[in-house]
Image (cartoon, helix red, strand yellow):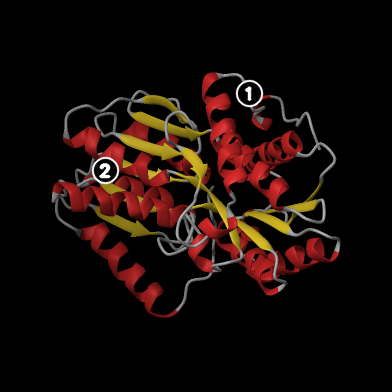
Amino acid sequence: MSVQNKKFTGAKAVLGTAVFAALMTGTALAEPALIYDAAGKNDKSFNEMAYNGAEAYKEETGNSYRDFEIQTDAQREQALRRFAQQGSSPIVVPGFTWAEPLNVVAQEFPDTHFAIIDSVVDLPNVRSVLFKEQEGSYLVGALAAMKSESGTIGYVTAFDFPLLQAFGCGYVQGAKAVNPDIEVLQNFIGTDFAAFNDINTAGEVGRSQLERGADVIYAAAGAAGEGALQAAADAGKYGIGVDSNQNYLFPGNMLTSMVKRVDVAVQDAFNDEANGEWSSGVQSLGLAEGGVGAAVDEYNEELITDEMSAKLEELTAKINSGEIEVHDYRSDNSCPVS
């Protein structure tokens, strides 16, 4: 899930400006590169998972990498082009907002490898990594329905966009598979990319769902999602995180997180280039590929009963075998259940 943020102040802005200036005048690079979407590496969600993948590559191989946090949309093409000019390969960009600038720059540097996460750029030197978010969301939806005592659960997301609808549709399908009568409240935070960082409004939307009876809320809204998760925790109810494992945010009130292994996509891209095994084209990562899943750890294991664990294993096996086919909203812009 991609994140946008147009407000950067203080030390981060100063550092970002300095790093960008260095990029514009720097010497040749041999390292791979990672350019975050606008919320940067510390968003506790999508971008942070990308950063974790780069750090895992560095730790396991001893190789270095370059990264950069953009401050404005104008820097997208500039940063891509400068890293390519200085020899970085692959250059990885997480988020569908990178598709247009990458399509431009990748054609200018046909011998440089690029990878984009959550979108497809159909060029011979680009790897496009997609995830089956609907499969992971199906699992957390089933857990939510099993945990709910009120018979009402919620889904909070940034705005009306097919990728975000895919999360919600998978969630509803999983919940309905466990309890056909469960009510699933679904609300948007805003109308555009700015919603990914509107924590206050996310909190208001979460509180509204709680007032309407929801006792579990799935927040798939990047950095803004923390507002809805906070609302659930404050009310003594349960939240479900997204992208990175957010169970640690509110221990005891986080039912689980729908983990999307953006870190694996980044680490694989770096490793494949280093090992001479690069491949372009489209990769699609679901449950079977370890690309998505429901997180269980020390922060939420007491909330997951034996019955819930067994159901999780059963549903995972059925999805992997094809017995359960989770509908992808993006295939026809519709959801078979609501």
**Front residue (pair 191, 222):** 222
Label 1 and label 2: CA atoms lie apart by: 43 Å
Can you identify the residue that label 1 sits on? Answer: 324
Label 1 crowd bin: few (<14), some (14–19), many (20+), radius 10 Å:
few
Return the mark for residue 5: none
Q: In this view, does 156 lie to the left or right of 35?
A: right
Q: Which amino acid does label 1 sit on?
A: Ile
Query: Quadrant of the rendered structure where residue 178 is?
Result: top right
Which x, y percent locates residue 190?
72, 58
- When asked about the image quadrant of residue 290, the answer is top left
Q: Examine the rendered structure and indicate whether residue 289 appears above or below residue 24.
A: above
Q: Which residue is drawn at 36% across and 30% down?
A: 126
List the single residue furthest toward the front.
306
Instruction: Return the mark for residue 84.
Output: 2
Horizontal placement of 325 versus 76: left or right? right
Point 41% across, 52% down: residue: 49
- Specify whether residue 68 is in view: yes
Give the mark nearest the N terminus, 1 or 2: 2
The amino acid on which the numbered mark 2 sits, given as a three-letter code, is Ala
The foreground one among 252 and 58 is 252
